[in-house]
Each structure stands twice: as structure tokens, then as C-alpha cells.
Amino acid sequence: MFSSLLVANRGEVAVRIVRAAKELGIRTIAVYSEADRGALHTRLADEAYCIGPAPAQESYLNITNLLTLATLLGVDAVHPGYGFLAENARFAELVEEVGITFVGPPSEVIARMGDKATARRTMRSLGIPVLPGTDILHDVEEALREAEAIGYPVLVKATAGGGGRGMRIARTPEELRAAFRTAQLEAERAYGNGGLYLERYVERSRHIEVQILADRYGNVVHLGERECSLQRRHQKLLEESPSLPLTPAMREELGERVVRAVRGLGYVGAGTLEFLYDVRTGELFFIEMNTRLQVEHPVTEWVTGIDIVRETIRLAAGEPLEIRQEDVVLRGWSIECRINAEDPERGFLPTPGRLERVHLPGGFGVRVDTYAEPGAVIPPHYDSLVAKLVVWGETRDEAIRRMRRALDELVLEGDRLRTTAPLCRQIVDDPQFVRGDVHTGFLEEFLASRRAGVAGS
């Protein structure tokens, strides 16, 4: 096992990694920007060092500063968490080159799966069904020709990055021309890579993802699936595990396929394969793989009893999987709400600032992953996620009731601060959500009905 670990991230995920590492007896080193001086993760770690000014490009994305610090301190490993450099193959490669362990898959696997067009080809070759689509497109004229062959509507997608940036729906050739230009510019700004490809757009679909763990000795297990259909502009808001449409037989078949494919990749660590479930046909299609820890990993931890963050560290240290597939039993139901510092009434405009009053809910089956505390600052420079409120229940109905109670207890207040908590509270009361009748367009329809109701009142 490692003796020291540098956590190359911030916020709630940095707190989560520090805690897991300490339980393994590992000395933890936190990094922070000038905007995060005194933040919770810096105080929980054994040591903390400033790596630059507030802008992410000058701090958390500054590979030179991170590698210099890691080598000067002689750390054994670097954990990237998620976001920032977590899926940057060049960063992973450089960490490996200086003799430090990167907590994640090998850099060549990150590169192969990080390019979504390449990932589609790879998964198809490994027997995983993928949505009809294209390889990387050269120009909009090629996109128009390919769209005619695929059939409208189509989804224009950036081949790099994630989180919904560089992604647009086009239902006509005219919309495709505009969507291509917009997605390309957005992808170039976000990832420095304007490469695009097309995919068939499934109108009524559910977003289902499968969590895996793999060691360097060829052992792979899947930890069931998560339902991630509640999202706005491809940004997830609420996740749960398991997913209602999947029967035990479907779960077993999908899991076996995923395990075979991941074993064929030579993968090590935690990863997630994302699928679209066509509500009309019952078909599942691969869309992409995340070669890192996922934001929504706690719902899987709740229903399996497996500490995924702990496993990322163990597996990177070369320890074998202690879990066999028959050991993985899904028990109960878990739901996660992402509490972002955003104002849903103003188009989810970020609302950074200082937290003045904080009360985190507790009780049986309630977990809060956060860096929030009175006086904590939510900087304007980074992702707006403040907390993840996660609950568990014996049944989905019990988990929903527990989430309502926990959201009612949650207090995150500050000058002009608004969060997504009230919106989450309305969603878990919605009869359609309670029935489990959700899809990737659910949240947009829900917001539109609210706006129509306000306008008509």
C-alpha cells in the first residue's frame, strides 16, 4: 500500500478521497488554489500546498505545478478524483513517467476511451451494441450527408470531454448546420479539440450506466447499474440505483457483456460504461465510457456496501480485487440529489458566495458528501456542486420518503445564494417521478410545465 497520496482536486471529492486514504493509513497531501485557501479538504489532509491563483488553468489544471509538487514531496501516488485532469491521458502519462502511480487506468486506455468516436469503435469490436453514428467528421457537409443516412433527429457530439459541452440536437438539415458550428466552437473552448461526430438521437430514452472495478490481474466485477435520466442539457441532477426497467436477467446479461469488454481493454481501477435505454424497444446502446470515479458513485456504494473510493486506491497500489461477482448483491434503493449553487428560476445561473448558515441532514440512511460549513466560500471559478445528498431505503418508495425528509432538513444559506435543493424537493414529490416514469427529457418537460403553471396563475 502507498505511504503518501497527493489529491489533485478540490471540493467534496477531495474531502472524500482524503477520508478514504486516511482509513487506509496513507499520508494525504491536499492542493488548493488561492480561492480555496482554508477550505475543508486542506484542513482534513495531513499537508496542504497552494498551487496557483484562482483560475483553474493556473492551479488545478496546471500540470507543471502539480507534477513539480508531487516529485518534490516524493509522493507515491496521485489521485485525480473527477473533473479537472481525471481523464487527461497526457497528465496520467506524465505522472507515470516520473515514477509516481496514477490512481486510475493506464494512460493509453484513458486516451483510447477518452475519444468517444474511438471508444464507439472499440466497444463495437468487443461485442457491445452502440448507437448508429459516425466517426469524426471533417466538415458540416459530411455531417449533412451522414445525417441523411442515419435519419433525423441526430445528436452532434464532441469527441473529447464530457458533461454535455459540445453536444446539440438537430432535427433538420438547417438545425444541423447551426448545431455543428455551435458544438464545434464550444468543444474547442472547453477541450481544445473541436472534433465532432454524429449519433442517432433516441427521443424517449433512459440514461443507464454500469459501474465496474478491475485489477491488474484480469479480474473484473460490475456493481450493478445507476439510473441517471434526470438531467438538464446533459448535466445530471438526480441519480438512483438500481434502475426500474432492468430485470435481474437483463442486469446479469448486461453486466456479463460489460465485464467481458472491460477485461478486453486491459482496464485497471474504477470505471463506468454509459448506455441509452430505448423506452420503446427495450434496447440498450453504449454511448461512452468514463475512465474515472463518477460523481454519483455513492448510490452504488449504498446498495452494494462497497467503498468504491477505497477500491480505486487499493487497485492502483497493485492489490487484487477482494470481491467476486457472486459477492455483489444489490440491497435496497439509493437516490442522490446534486445540490448545486445555481438558481433554477434564472436558467440555472451560478450563485457563488459565502455560506452563512449550514445544517446538514442526518439520521438512518442519510449521507451528505460536501465541503459546506459556515463561512465556506463557493468560488465562481469552478463547478457549482456544493453537496451530494444521498439516501438509502429498503424500497424505492422508502428512499423517496427519506429524501423528502432530508431535503426538508437541509439548510445552505448565504447572501444571494440559491441552490437546486428546492427543485429536487419538487421532483421527488412529482407523481410521474414517483411512478418511475422518467426519461432523459423528463427534467426539461418538468421545468416547462412549471413555467406554464406560473404563467397561467
Image (cartoon, rainbow, N blue to C red):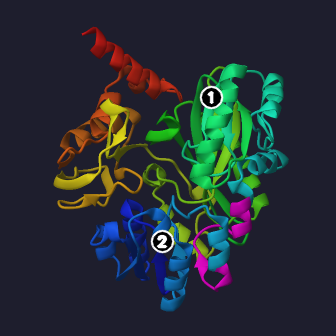
In the image, which is nearer the foreground, mark 1 or mark 2? Answer: 1
Question: Image height check: is 74 above or below 209?
Answer: below
User: Residue 65 at what x, y percent from top left?
Assistant: 51, 78
Is residue 231 visible in this depiction of the protein? yes
Residue underneath mark 2 = 8
Is residue 436 rendered to the left or right of residue 198?
left
Q: Position of residue 323 (x, y in %)?
A: 58, 64
Q: Residue at x 32, y 57 (%)?
A: 379
Q: Amino acid at mark 1?
A: Ile
State which quarter of the image contains the C terminus. Answer: top left
Front-most of 245 and 298? Answer: 298
Q: CA distance from mark 1 to mark 2?
A: 34 Å
Q: Looking at the rendered structure, which numbered label has been put on residue 169?
A: 1
Residue for point 51% across, 58% down: 83
Packing grade of label 1 (10 A; few <14, some 14-19, many >=20) is: many
Report x, y in % for residue 77: 54, 80
Q: Quadrant of residue 282?
A: top right
Residue type of the residue flagged with mark 2: Ala
From what the image shows, is residue 361 above or below residue 347?
Answer: below
**Residue at (77% x, 21% y) in the render:** 151
Q: Secondary structure at mark 1?
A: strand
In reply to whether residue 414 is colored magenta, the answer given is no
Q: Quadrant of residue 245?
A: top right
Say whether residue 106 is magenta: yes
Mark closest to the chain's N terminus, 1 or 2: 2
Q: Find the magenta span and give its range.
A: 96-111
Secondary structure beneath label 2: loop
Crowd rating for badge 2 (residues with CA inside 10 Å; few <14, some 14–19, many 20+):
many
Q: Look at the picture and state if 412 lies above or below 327.
A: above
Q: Residue at x 64, y 31 (%)?
A: 179
